[in-house]
Image (cartoon, helix red, strand yellow):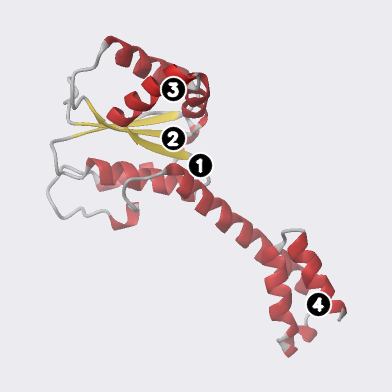
Amino acid sequence: MLNEQTVEKLYAMKLNGMADAFKEQLHMPDMNELSFDERFALLVDRQWTWKEDRRMKRLLSNAKLKINACVEDIDYKTPRGLDKSLILRLSNCEWIRNAHNIIITGPTGVGKTYLACALANRACRMGYSAFYIRIPRLFQELAIARGDGSYPKIMKKLAKVKILVLDDLGLAPMTAPERRDILEVIEDRHGVASTLIATQIPIQM
């Protein structure tokens, strides 16, 4: 009875990982051979793992990634000009810690969106917040926000996220308000957080 009450209290305190581990320990006779410190350490480890798993799932859900892509699944065999060593370096997310930015360019169909989502997915798995949005949708939402008064709230959200993925830049000529919007978004994030842009527009060297 006491064990049941303990489990209920753990769930009530939202210590679900610890509660699950404790219930498992109750059905494992060999657990009695462990010391209190060892058993307690196992409970804490399970709670930590449960909490980190929930956090990662929340980050991935909030990122709204268009594709469920992973850097581990990137195809380097197809000739697309991908530098595997560069992708592996980017996978350690040092560029995000340093608030650096990335521009991915190339024609339609080469996998720009996949690569962008894969890097954002990796960032979420490393504990960073991310958000994906296509440029046309961004301009649409900002135009609506300007009318209903939620513009400052959206701009604050875009400025706060650690990696902002802006896809399909330059599909159509931008209006003056749209140019100001994109400038404000990038200016708010400059030197503070990372922005990843995917575009068909070639970068002039």
Check the image and report above or below for 168 versus 118. above
Q: Residues within 10 Å of mark 4 (few under 14, many from 20)?
A: few
Q: Does the rendering let one see residue 96?
A: yes
Pinpoint residue 189: horizontal percent, then vertical percent. 46, 22
Q: Which label sits in the foreground, 2 or 3?
A: 3
Relative to residue 140, is residue 87 depicted above or below? below
Q: CA distance from mark 1 to mark 4?
A: 37 Å
Cα gap from disc 3 to disc 4, whole angstroms? 51 Å
| Mark pair 2, 1: CA separation | 8 Å
Q: How many marks?
A: 4
Mark 1 or 4 closer to N-term? 4
Q: Which residue is mark 3?
A: 145
Residue tagged 4: 4
User: In the rendered image, which quarter is residue 164 located in?
Assistant: top left
Name the amino acid type tagged 1.
Tyr
Per the image, the residue denoted by label 2 is 163
**Image quadrant where one finds the N terminus:** bottom right
> Which marked residue is nearer to the observer: mark 1 or mark 4?
4
> What residue is drawn where x is 19% and y is 23%?
203
Q: Nearer the viewer, mark 3 or mark 4?
A: 3
